[in-house]
Image: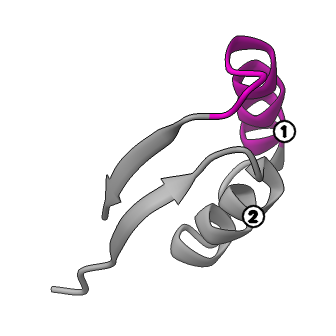
Amino acid sequence: DNVFSFSWVDFKDFDEIAQKLNELLPGIDQNLISNFNKEMNKTFPEGFLIKVEI
């Protein structure tokens, strides 16, 4: 199995996260990523930390 392990990621940079999602999930719906970014920016304008393990 391919395991992608990230330590704590600063989600203030949502574009960087979207880029990582694109790399990990080729063919992912771009609207999904765009909406994700918008919602995250709205909900967490100051950013937040999350542990990401894929």
Would residue 1 be found to the left or right of residue 42 on screen? left
Q: Where on the picture, by quarter, is residue 27?
A: bottom right
- Image location of residue 24, percent across then percent down: 52, 73
Q: Which mark is residue 34?
A: 1
Q: Which mark is residue 10?
A: none
Q: Mark 2 belongs to which amino acid?
A: Glu
The residue pinned by badge 2 equals 16
- Of helix, strand and loop, which one carries label 2? helix
Total marks placed: 2
- Image location of residue 23, percent across then percent down: 62, 77
Would residue 36 be found to the left or right of residue 31 on screen? left
* 9 or 36, nearer to the observer: 9
- Image location of residue 51, percent across then percent down: 33, 51
Query: Seen from this angle, which residue lies furthest bottom?
Result: 2
Would residue 50 be found to the left or right of residue 14 on screen? left
Q: Mark 1 belongs to which amino acid?
A: Ser
Give the distance between the C-alpha atoms of the residues marked 1 and 2, in whole angstroms: 12 Å
Assess disc 2: are there few (<14), some (14-19) or many (≥20) residues with their C-alpha within 10 Å of its C-alpha: few
Query: Seen from this angle, which residue lies furthest front?
Result: 46
- Image location of residue 18, percent across then percent down: 72, 57
Residue 38 against residue 32 in the figure, above or below = above
Bounds of the magenta span? 31-47
Residue 49 against residue 18 in the figure, above or below = above
Residue 24 against residue 53 in the figure, above or below = below
Q: Is residue 43 magenta?
A: yes
Q: Where on the picture, by quarter, is residue 39?
A: top right
Q: Earlier in the sequence, mark 1 or mark 2?
A: 2
* 54 or 50, nearer to the observer: 50
Would residue 53 be found to the left or right of residue 33 on screen? left
Residue ID at (24%, 80%): 3
Which image quarter holds the N terminus? bottom left
